[in-house]
Image (tube, rainbow, N blue to C red):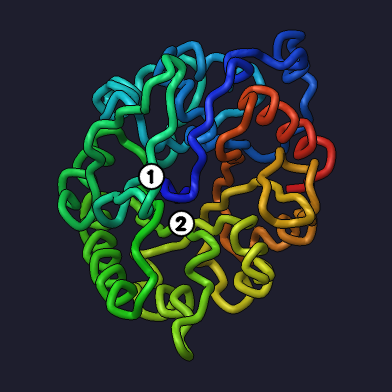
Amino acid sequence: MSLNRRRFLQSAGTLALSSAVLSGKASSLLLKHPVGVQLFTFFGVIDEDVKGTLTKIKAAGYSELESAFSKKGGYYGMKPKEFKAMANDLGLVWKSHHVLGAPFKMPAGAKMPNGADGKPMVIPPMLNLTENMQQLVDEAAEGGIKYLVCAMAPTGTLEEVNASIAILNKTGEAAAKAGIQFAYHNHDMEFKAIGDKVPYDLLLSETDPQKVKMELDLAWAMKAGKNPVDLFKAHPGRFPLWHVKDLDASRENILPVGSGTLDFKPVFAAASTAGMKSFFVEHDGPKDPYASINSSIQYISKNINI
């Protein structure tokens, strides 16, 4: 979930529930495996009403959460134990949390988008593994979550790749001592070769396979021309977490799961080879996040066997 790739759009529609959620259709879902949601889907919305947002997520049929960045700072303005208690009270399991690998920098020439008040969004300083690794591990342990995930790390040059590998291994060690599984989340950029080297291949080969697992974002990998099943076969058991989103034919626009062009059935058929334990539906910058997650889980319920 690369912050420098997101539009951070927020429209009036983001506060509207889809009719399916309102009518309680979630109760008819046929789910054999827990379905999670990545809360970045609700960036710009969740901070206005955290409990209300989580309540609607639960009503849509989701049972697991992966948290991310908040305009309020911390864990949607709460301490880890507070957020966990809220999730648990609503029948949700807080499974994983995303953090940055290095200090966040806006792309050259980019500006923060406006929020609902028409003013540029203001985000508190975001902690990162390079500068705040132990604090982030300690907070994950305080929250009792199973996974801590590096959402992104610099991989534009071999120097950046090597520095990222070092911090990933360091965090993997610290997380293991705290009883947490650490993982790395990809975008398509990690698959772009630097000379004769592919950053993602280096991330796989140069990090500890037990202490640094992978959260495979299926859509970004497929956009980069990779077949997730091939990755699973080459590195069995390395991919306990997945992100699931869909793409249109141009591979430029994100869509709810099942409404685009990606074929998820063979990927889910290889879940045991991947070592998949949890997967999280994600939609970056949707006009209506509630309608999006409802559409996604309806498709998963009817079409995915796992």
* Relative side of 234 to 45, left or right: right
Instruction: Name which residue type carries label 1.
Output: His
Compared to residue 134, the image places residue 25 above or below, namely above
At which x and y percent is residue 159? 28, 78
Quadrant housing residue 199: bottom left
* Relative side of 168 to 61, left or right: left
Q: Give the farthest residue toward the bottom.
A: 196
| Dot 2 and dot 1 residues touching (CB under 8 Å) | yes
SS assignment at label 2:
strand
Residue at image point 77% right, 31% down: 298
At which x and y percent is residue 47? 40, 20
Residue at image point 61% right, 63% down: 221
Residue at image point 40% right, 71% down: 209
Distance from disc 2 to disc 1, alpha carbons, whole Å, reads 9 Å
SS assignment at label 1:
strand
Dot 1 corresponds to which residue? 98
Quadrant housing residue 276: bottom right
Q: Give the farthest residue toward the right.
A: 302
